[in-house]
Amino acid sequence: MLQSLYVRDYALIEELEMEFGSGLNIITGATGAGKSILIGALSMILGERANTDVVRGDAKKAVVEGIFDDADTERIRSVLEENAIETGPLPRVILRRRITERGSRGFVNDTPATLDVMRAVAAELIDLHGQHEHQSLLHTETHLRLLDSFGGLGGLVEHYQEKRQRVADLVAEREQLANRERELRQQKELYEFQIEEIDEVDPQPGEEEELEAERRVLENAEQLYSSTRGLYEMLFEDENAVHDQLVVARNDLQDLARIDDAFEEQVDEIETAQIIVSELANFLQDYNAHIEFDPERLEAIRQRTTELEKLKRKYGGTLEAVLEHRREIGEQYELAQDFEGNLERLDEEICEAQADLTDVALRLSDKRREVAARIEDAILDELATLGMPDSQFEVRFTRQEEPDGWIRPGDAEARYRAFQKGVDQVEFFISTNVGVAPRPLAEVASGGEISRIMLALKTILAKSERLPILVFDEIDVGISGDMARRVGESMHALARYHQIITITHLPQIAALGDRHFKVEKIVEDGTTKTTIHRLDENEQATQVASLISGEDVTDAALKNARELMAAGERED
């Protein structure tokens, strides 16, 4: 919902702030009072291009700011994250435009943003209909979205997109492989040489550490022999060997323990020490007996280490890097060896994936055509209600043939392009006059017709889609009387689901507003200004009456106005 709109120094507007509400917000005012200026200001925060002439009088800059709540959508979050814009206190979003004589700047949540970013965010929030460019119905991509929303086809569309992505991934993989064919064939001999070189040495994980440990032992065999022999003799064989001394000490402690029990624990301790010394002496004797003086083995280790160092220098600096390089070039070599086989395998997978994609695409297309028939009937009924009884409305489907298209129905020769959301391109066609063939909706010239067509579409789609805020300008062009009442009733009904802001000069529509604003042009201190004022119930009745009878409000017009307002309340 558009919570508030703030405008300062824009055209004839010095400063104003409008607090909108849910439901139907009405804006009225005399011709030339500045209603179009207000819509122009609103379009600034929708990302429309700005003319620097809009800065008022001697002011240095114009500012337009809109605060939106209930704006926490996946698309908005995505746009904000992609452009490094703080989400702020979602679900609120603030759009602001600052215009000077040198140009303009846009802001989203107080962060500078390009017009493209502002448009992307605004497109999720507000839809403006009238004599302005920001009309979603004029963009054919909107037609498909509305169709899918009405039919509840979102899940099937996502399923199609998953199948399409699978095909895209496989096609990309095949193209990448085909592009590498020449490179692989050129590299094959090099890979073969490197594989032979590495495999001839046959390095093993952790081998370097094992060789280094063995080399240290062999290079220090003499020291190990003499040291272990000396330690063994000191512990067990010398005249005053440690083991013998412990035996003597143990005996003395046992004598003392027979005198005083306090020495019994010490006897246990020295017996433990005697056991430890005996085990250590046995280890040293066994180690000493197995020491080898093997210069040939030492030389073999040195040669092996040299071979490993050579591989490390050529292939990455570490043995782990050498082994990883061997794995990678092995895969590439196998790929080059069976290049055709790999291409055939991918072709088979692509064929299967395209068949799956085609199946889902055709099912989605069939569902869309069923939905389109329902929409056509519903739109024609609604257009008749809105004063366009001779209308023709068609949802037309087209497909784009493509020699290498991913979608191939049945045994047909034709292949079709797989668009992001299906095989179909959808466009709305309409004729509002008898004997005139339907034309693309985007070619309909009348802003009033476009607005009423949009109102008809939004009315039937209201319960099936979370649509943005709707702003209608000049929706009542060319209608009056009973037809104006019908348009007002449709807008009033639609406002139960969405916030609507509309500029109107018809009392039948103005009387149904939940909030009513009056735009006026005043002269103050020799300067013309546009102001806006929210009306209370009595003021609203007077304003509606003025739309009926003119500036001189009669009692009959005022009574009629209150009756129109009461009729709207009864509908609620």
Image (tube, helix red, strand yellow):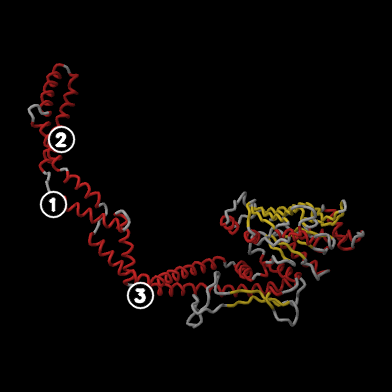
Q: What element carries label 3?
A: helix
In the displayed structure image, the side of residue 238 where residue 264 appears, left or right? right
Instruction: From the top left corner, tell me how far across and down residue 254 is, in percent.
Output: 13, 21
Badge 2: few (under 14), some or many (20 or more) residues near its Cα, within 10 Å?
some
The answer to whether the residues at label 3 and label 2 have Cβ atoms under 8 Å apart is no
Label 3 to label 1: alpha-carbon separation: 50 Å
Q: What residue type is labelled 1?
A: Glu
Residue 443: image quadrant is bottom right
For residue 166, say whether it is visible: yes
Q: Which amino acid does label 2 sit on?
A: Leu
Observer-nearest residue: 12 or 298? 298
The answer to whether the residues at label 1 and label 2 have Cβ atoms under 8 Å apart is no
Badge 1: few (under 14), some or many (20 or more) residues near its Cα, within 10 Å?
few
Observer-nearest residue: 95 or 559? 95
Observer-nearest residue: 233 or 510? 233
Label 3 to label 2: alpha-carbon separation: 67 Å
Q: What residue type is labelled 3?
A: Glu
In the displayed structure image, the side of residue 280 where residue 427 appears, left or right? right
Badge 3: few (under 14), some or many (20 or more) residues near its Cα, within 10 Å?
few
Q: Tell me the tag on residue 280.
A: 2
Q: Tell me the tag on residue 340.
A: 3
Which mark is nearer the camera, 3 or 1?
1
- The residue where tag 1 is placed is 296
